[in-house]
Amino acid sequence: MEALKAPTVFRAQVLPDSTIKSPFAVVKTDTKPEQSMLKLERHNHGLPAIASCPYIRQLFDVVGPDRDYVDCEDYETVQDPFYLVFEWMEHDLRAVPSDKFRQGSNLPRTIAKSVLSALTVIKQKYNSCHTDISPNNIFLSNPSGPSPIVKLVHWLCPESIFGSRGKNVKGSYEAWSIAKLQRLIGPMDPPIDDPALVAEFALARKMGIAHYEDPDTKKMTRVLRIGTLREELARIPGLKISPDLIDFIHYLLVIDHTKRPTAAEAMQHPYLLASEVPRETSMIARLLHLLRSALWYP
């Protein structure tokens, strides 16, 4: 047993006579008495379309003092500790060095197709969405081989980050983050008519055009130093990005949910339908890292 994220996530060696074919499995538990997150994860992975989806990490088994009790539909009533046994994947996307896939690799296309396929299942079968697509939640095995395996860690939520049908996830809204997204992607309006949110967007617009006098150079300098998406991609050293990939990224990054493509629609984009081997790096990982970092750093 090896701790991956102590004290809740471990890598365990699988015994030879087990029905699990992999040499390893991931064992996950919850130290909190209510185990609410673990129960929700158990419930989600028990949904038929999720359990059978080849692009979502598989739940192998549930271990507890009374398995039938853990497996019952009223999973929220479970009080005794239990453990989820997931399939083992070699890496998360953040840990895969992109420089190995900059020439002659189909890995970026495979990552995009796998993630979008998983999102399509979640949306079409349960009218839900995944609210945390990040390099930490995309797992890979055999990334350097001819047939890499890419799977999504599943997380079911009934609303998207800016919501659907006029709804939004409640929480704090940071004008600084909004300003950077506007700079990267383009102008956007508040998703709902909420005074506090309207004020944040108004402040973000001012941040986007504000300047100050640099104390060292004495020159007027832009407060928000991040560039547009194309400018930021161009700054990545030693990287040449195909126009098709940039078009695909822009196609996905649409704030207006009425114009944003669904996962199923995105699967039909020419970049994913093309058969030639791309020459760019694993830009899906780079893009996710860029957007994630842009929300917190100038």
Image: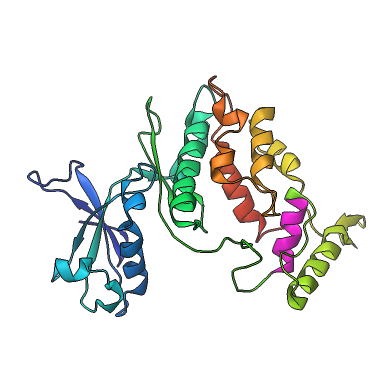
Dominant SS in magenta: helix
Quarter assignment of residue 285:
top right
Rendering coords of residue 75 (x, y %): 28, 72
Q: Determine the image quadrant of residue 272.
A: top right
- 129 is within the stretch colored magenta: no
Residue nearest the observer in this picture, 50 or 296: 50
Residue 252 shown left or right of residue 217 in the figure: left
Q: How is the image coloured?
A: rainbow
The reply, left or right, for residue 276 in relation to residue 255 is left
Number of numbered tags placed on the structure image: 0
Q: Residue at x 7, y 45 (%)?
A: 17
Residue 261 in the image: above or below residue 191: above
Near-viewer residue (158 or 86): 158
Instruction: For the C terminus, give its image quadrant.
Output: bottom right
Answer whether residue 241 is visible to the viewer in this image.
no
Looking at the picture, does residue 183 appear above or below residue 200?
above
Q: Seen from this angle, which residue lies furthest top?
A: 276
Residue 122: image location, x then y, percent: 45, 52
Residue range in magenta is 174-184
Tell whether 139 sits left or right of 174: left
Rendered-image quadrant of the N terminus: bottom left
Image point 66% across, 59% down: which residue? 295
Q: Is residue 183 magenta?
A: yes
Q: Is residue 101 visible?
A: yes
Residue 30 position (above or below residue 60): below
Image point (55%, 63%), residue name: 159
- The residue lying at 68 percent from left, 70 percent from top is 173
Relative to the observer, which residue lies in front, 169 or 227?
Answer: 169
Residue 240 at what x, y percent from top left?
66, 28
Q: Position of residue 229 (x, y in %)?
A: 72, 44
